[in-house]
Amino acid sequence: MTKPYLKKRKALRRKVLCGFPWSGKFTTKGEIENYFADDEIQCLLCGKWLKTLNTHLQRIHGTTKEQYCSQFGLPWKRGLACKDLSNRQGKAMKRRIEEGFKPPVDAARKKAKEAIRRKDQPFLTNIKSRTISKYNVSRLKWKHEDYGKVLSLILEKQKPLAEVCKDKNLPGLTAVYEYRKANSEFNQKYLGTLNSLPFHVQAQAQDLSSRFYDTIKRLSHEEGMSQREIAFKLGVSRRTVNFHLNRKISRLERL
């Protein structure tokens, strides 16, 4: 027979405060940060304040973290714990790692790959929409002459595309890539510009031209130079020569 005080305690644990469960959904990142900012986190199903919600959701409401996050638009990968507890857990994990503990990273990555892709929450959809809108507005202000100026500066300064695009008065790196896809004539000019750059600049850009492949093939097969000698002559790392030489050979073998 259950004791009366246990029944009372059980009823209190399941008591739902006025105004709950909450019928809304988080739509901005700021709202979510405010939700996790206090010393305790409030359960949006019953209104109680707790340090963490995982056990509470399972025992009192019979629901899971994923269902709770889906209902209220919370981030899928964020733990349902208050800021103070999250910070203490993070510091404790850092101490364990310093003492030699190795987290099962490979198992976590495998689990993430096998997991079913979940739909973006409203706050993340809003962030993506604002980012795309901002990008589209910035892209429309650039003209063909601005993209041509990027190519001129690449040749003039002998710098990779990413370095030149850091100038706020020029199109950004993403904008140039998109323009290359949309304009075949500009893309050919870019490839020609890339082909004329020194090999060490191409290697910095991680965008090596066909001339590089032809050169390392000639030096390796016709002149019999080692990979170390080729790397020294072209001003690139031996690893770059080894990777791209083997890659080119494997492609030829498949043809």
Image (cartoon, rainbow, N blue to C red):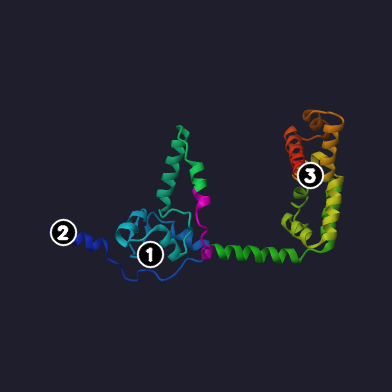
Numbered circles on residues, count: 3
Q: For residue 20, which quarter of the picture?
A: bottom left
The residue at 83%/62% (across/down) is 144
Which mark, by number, is residue 208? 3
Q: Nearer the viewer, mark 3 or mark 2?
A: 3
User: 41 and 55: which one is in front?
Assistant: 55
- The residues tagged by marks 1 and 3 sit, at their Cα atoms, a distance apart of 54 Å
- CB atoms at circles 2 and 1 under 8 Å apart? no
User: 229 and 177: which one is in front?
Assistant: 229
Q: Label 3 is placed on what type of residue?
A: Leu
Of label 3 and label 2, which has the lower sequence position? 2
Q: SS at mark 3?
A: loop
Of label 1 and label 3, which has the lower sequence position? 1
Whether the magenta-drawn stretch holds residue 4 is answered as no
Q: SS at mark 1?
A: loop
Residue 74 at x, y percent in the picture: 46, 61
Q: Label 1 is placed on what type of residue?
A: Leu
- The residues tagged by marks 3 and 2 sit, at their Cα atoms, a distance apart of 76 Å
Q: Is residue 46 left or right of residue 175?
A: left
The residue at 73%/54% (across/down) is 173
Within 10 Å of disc 2 (Cα), the crowding (few <14, some 14-19, many 20+) is few
Q: Which residue is mark 2?
A: 5
Report the magenta residues as a range: 111-123
- CB atoms at circles 1 and 3 under 8 Å apart? no
Q: Which residue is mark 1?
A: 44
| Position of 96 relative to 168 (above/below) | above
Whether the magenta-drawn stretch holds residue 120 is answered as yes
Of label 2 and label 1, which has the lower sequence position? 2
Q: Label 2 is placed on what type of residue?
A: Tyr
Residue 87 at x, y percent in the picture: 44, 47
